[in-house]
């Protein structure tokens, strides 16, 4: 990345930790055989994968045998949602999720609706928090599956996974959690949490892109039908030759995260607080999300500012807009609209997300750049009609 | 890598719009349409447009186009405002086709301004 850019988009992706890259290089060079082969070289590759599963399992406090490797969170979400809903279709056709889920979840629910499943879309409160009582109220006798994300990718809002999962357990509803923004960033104990399926991806916590995993709890009735076919790998749940070097990288990223997750949280909390302190006095600014959410994300809107111009005026900051997950869309974020924000508020939203490499001087510069950009664009605009 | 949505020209005009602001003593029109809020002013001295200024709420292409148009029209006779077309600005910046409507809002404002000079209103 160019030296003059200030990257504040760690919720979109993170740089690969050099130790992760080194592990990938080691494994990629030495353990190149097909891990399904039974010869010594194949067993060496298989051992590298087992090591990675142990590292990820340790991060999540999960049995490594419960982990299925995928290409990333999108595939994990697809496998979990479509696979579980179809596997359990005999129990009912009603499935439940939230309006503020990632597209990797909502698009699968839309696809299942076209297959004949009945979807309930639950609305969060104005902070984006799902009330467990509202969740329980949306469940029915024929509800067989629910999916709720751990940390929202746009706002950082954290849901009460323990309460929601407990409600599902009481009713024999399979419970999936999109953990893409949570794994490696907030403590997760799958031995204690009532979670049946959990999606994750490596590149959100300093691992490589193109590799993720799906946790499938080892308990009766917790299973998914495959969505890919072509071999017997990974208990036929997700066939295909495993990308050993990427898996080894995800394993190393997991080990690193496990050793510093509390320090990382403290670091990003300090940065987020400093950034918010530097801009919160701006007239018309508002926080999108819950102040008690994941501290690595700060999403703000400001009145009467055009979002695309704000984004350009913020350069060299590399941040995300309130447009639907990418700047190519002109549509205001459906997540922010679900929180009750107006189109005008949603289109002006900027998501700052900080990470391990972020420095205090960077966020102080960012706060100043944001203040200046808002002031400049407001000075350039005619007054709005009353 | 995704293509940069902004040309060097758009970035330059957006960063330093020399004609942003108000103009005392000129004629002014205001329009709000197509995600654009624009106030456009012009002053005429000795039969030529001596100064143009704009205030705008809009995307970077709109801001750049407003700056380019004001810069281009200074020194022209006010009669050119009425027949003004933004086609050259659209092409030179360039402006993506999906934003054509926004630039036409500016074009309409320029023509309205020209009409005001013609009518003496």
Image (spheres, rainbow, N blue to C red):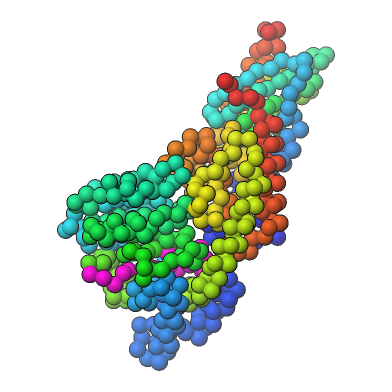
Residue A136 in the image, given as x and y percentages of width and height: 29, 50
Across the whole image, how many numbered discs are drawn on residues?
A: 0
Identify the residue shown where x is 62% and y is 31%. Answer: B57
Identify the residue shown where x is 42% and y is 70%. Answer: A60
Q: Work out whether B17 lies above or below A239.
A: above
Identify the residue shown where x is 64% and y is 50%. Answer: A275
Report whether B97 appears left or right of A105.
right
Magenta span has B76? Answer: no
Magenta span has A216? Answer: yes
Q: Quadrant of residue A4?
A: bottom right
Residue closer to the observer: A183 or B109: A183
Q: Is residue A158 visible?
A: yes
Identify the residue shown where x is 75% and y is 16%. Answer: B26
Q: Work out whether A37 lies above or below A20.
A: below
Residue at the outermost bottom position: A40
Residue at the outermost right position: B46
Report whether A143 appears left or right of B92.
left
Residue closer to the observer: A321 or B28: A321
Q: Is residue A246 visible?
A: no
Q: Quadrant of the N terminus of chain A?
A: bottom right
Q: Quadrant of the C terminus of chain A?
A: top right
Residue A301 in the image, given as x and y percentages of width and height: 56, 40
Residue A43 in the image, given as x and y percentages of width and height: 39, 88
Q: Which residues are magenta?
A: A200-220
Residue B39 in the image, given as x and y percentages of width and height: 66, 23
Report whether B9 appears left or right of A266.
right
Residue closer to the observer: A231 or A164: A164
């Amino acid at each position: 990345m160019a030296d003059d850019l200030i990257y504040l988009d760690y919720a979109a992706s993170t740089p690969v930790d050099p130790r992760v890259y080194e592990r990938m290089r080691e494994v990629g060079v030495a353990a190149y055989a097909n891990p399904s082969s039974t010869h010594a070289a194949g067993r060496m590759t298989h051992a590298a994968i087992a090591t990675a599963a142990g590292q990820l399992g340790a991060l999540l406090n999960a049995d490594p045998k419960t982990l299925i490797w995928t290409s990333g969170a999108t595939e994990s979400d697809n496998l979990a949602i479509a696979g579980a809903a179809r596997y359990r279709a005999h129990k009912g056709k009603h499935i439940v999720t939230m309006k503020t889920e990632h597209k990797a979840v909502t698009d699968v629910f839309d696809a299942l609706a076209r297959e004949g499943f009945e979807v309930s879309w639950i609305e969060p409160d104005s902070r984006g928090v799902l009330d467990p009582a509202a969740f329980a109220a949306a469940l029915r006798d024929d509800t067989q599956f629910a999916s709720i994300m751990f940390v929202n990718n746009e706002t950082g809002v954290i849901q009460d996974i323990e309460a929601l999962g407990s409600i599902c357990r009481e009713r024999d509803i399979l419970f999936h959690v999109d953990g893409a923004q949570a794994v490696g960033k907030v403590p997760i104990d799958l031995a204690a949490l009532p979670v049946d399926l959990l999606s994750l991806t490596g590149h959100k916590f300093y691992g490589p892109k193109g590799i993720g995993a799906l946790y499938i709890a080892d308990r009766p009735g917790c299973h998914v039908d495959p969505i890919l076919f072509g071999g017997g790998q990974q208990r036929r749940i997700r066939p295909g030759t495993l990308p050993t070097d990427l898996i080894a990288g995800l394993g190393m990223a997991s080990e690193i995260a496990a050793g510093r997750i509390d320090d990382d949280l403290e670091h990003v909390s300090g940065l987020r607080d400093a950034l918010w302190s530097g801009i919160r006095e701006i007239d018309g600014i508002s926080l999108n999300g819950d102040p008690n959410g994941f501290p690595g994300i700060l999403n703000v809107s400001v009145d009467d500012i055009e979002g695309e111009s704000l984004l350009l005026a913020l350069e060299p900051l590399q941040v995300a807009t309130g447009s639907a997950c990418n700047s190519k869309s002109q549509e205001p974020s459906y997540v922010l609209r679900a929180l009750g924000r107006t189109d005008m508020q949603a289109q002006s939203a900027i998501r700052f997300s900080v990470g391990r490499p972020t420095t205090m001087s960077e966020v102080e510069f960012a706060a100043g750049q944001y203040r200046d950009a808002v002031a400049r664009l407001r000075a350039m605009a005619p007054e709005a009609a009353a | 890598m995704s293509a940069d949505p902004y040309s060097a020209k758009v970035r330059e005009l957006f960063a330093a719009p020399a004609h942003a602001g108000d103009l005392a003593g000129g004629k002014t029109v205001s329009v709000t349409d197509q995600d654009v809020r624009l106030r456009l002013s012009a002053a005429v001295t000795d039969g030529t447009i001596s100064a143009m200024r704009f205030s705008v709420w809009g995307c970077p292409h709109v801001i750049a186009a407003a700056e380019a148009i004001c810069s281009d029209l200074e020194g022209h006779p006010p009669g050119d405002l009425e027949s003004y077309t933004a086609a050259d600005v659209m092409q030179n910046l360039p402006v993506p086709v999906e934003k054509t409507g926004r630039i036409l809002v500016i074009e309409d404002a320029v023509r309205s301004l020209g009409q005001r000079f013609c009518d003496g209103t």
